[in-house]
Amino acid sequence: MFRSPIRFCRVCATAVEYRVPDDGDTRVRAVCPSCGTIHYENPLNVVGTVAYWGPQGGQVLLCRRNIEPRWGKWTLPAGFLELGETTEQGAVRETQEEAGAEIALEGLFTLLNVARAGQVHIYYRARLLSDRFAPGHETLEARLFHEHEIPWDDLAFRTVQETLRHYFEDRRRGHFGVHTGDITW
Amino acid sequence: MFRSPIRFCRVCATAVEYRVPDDGDTRVRAVCPSCGTIHYENPLNVVGTVAYWGPQGGQVLLCRRNIEPRWGKWTLPAGFLELGETTEQGAVRETQEEAGAEIALEGLFTLLNVARAGQVHIYYRARLLSDRFAPGHETLEARLFHEHEIPWDDLAFRTVQETLRHYFEDRRRGHFGVHTGDITW
């Protein structure tokens, strides 16, 4: 989600100034010289799932992107958290929208910072209730992958790579934890 | 952080229209009829710490708020995550700004949704490196509390209450987990 720079006040349409507000703040913000509105911009949450199929959880659901960025690359179902929903609700919604998949959430799995993009990516483990999918308009194809089939070189995002890596590592050792980290490479 | 409704386009100052964009979206957004900019609004992250003192972690750091909302109430050090920083960096910064406290982070502790407020609150456990504090301008007083001293009826936010409750429960059973939940009451 590209965000255009703020040029005009959302409240009164006056051209904003970039300066540190007078309220004890320490950061430069877009401030309206007319009505005084301070326009904050903050990181966004991306929420999604690593959804598995089968009693041993040997297969996971990936979606091939039909949108930019990374058109044609494979991703875990995920998208921007919306106002009014919880991170869990957002993760379920995105899995439904992108893959048409029905799931039962099983817990927080990864929380990965992508500070250079102003994003926090939050993934939940989820059990697939069916192996029949119905890709939405943002998805070219939704299918299950065994570990040896994962298209590691054609994944859309590093947070997807990290989350899949943790999933198969945890699966091998027989215990799923909660993993945090920063994507800096 | 109260957000004023969007009335004018941030890019070209035209009055926005509220409608579902034509790009396959399903939600009503503020859309500019002139330049086409879609103005998304999404939940904000609040990041903070439950910072303890002493080898048994028997005391935790609380700050008495010198700002609205909840002026005069007690809170864990926390605030809005800023662009360009990770959740960990934000939690450390807020602890420094509000309490002047030096800490070492010890891991993710709670992730609590406050969907009605459009917020996700993320707390980290942290070890205090000193018991000397230097409250910032947003804080009336910063001090350590044993469990029996916690001002449960004068806490600023339910996420603070939940995080403290989990902290002392986990401390009693001798193991700190990662806790998730939704604040709906």
Image: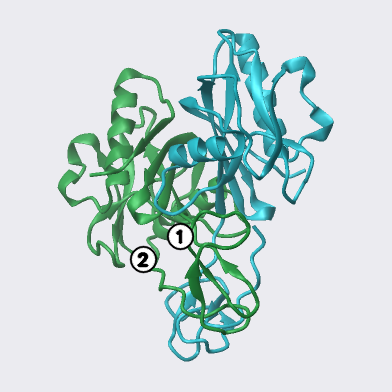
Chain colours: A green, B cyan
Give the structural element (helix, strand or loop) at label 2.
loop
Q: Sort mark 1 into few (<14), some (14-19) or many (20+) by Cα contacts within 10 Å.
A: some
Q: Sort mark 2 into few (<14), some (14-19) or many (20+) by Cα contacts within 10 Å.
A: some
Task: Please identify the quarter of the rendering in which residue B161 is found.
Answer: top right
Image quadrant occupied by the C terminus of chain B: top right
Task: Please identify the quarter of the rendering in which residue A113 is found.
Answer: top left
Please say if A45 is above or below B41. Answer: above
Seen at 29% across and 30% down, the residue is: A168
Q: Which residue is mark 1?
A: A97
Q: Which mark is residue A138?
A: 2
Q: Position of residue B37 (x, y in %)?
A: 45, 80
Please say if B138 is above or below A9. Answer: above
What's under tag 2, amino acid-wise? Glu
**Mark 2 vs mark 1: which is more N-terminal?**
1
Left-right relation of A184 to A106: left
For the residues bearing labels 2 and 1, Cβ distance under 8 angstroms: yes
Find the distance from the CA under tag 2 to the CA under tag 1.
8 Å
Seen at 60% across and 13% down, the residue is: B57
Disc 1: which chain? Answer: A
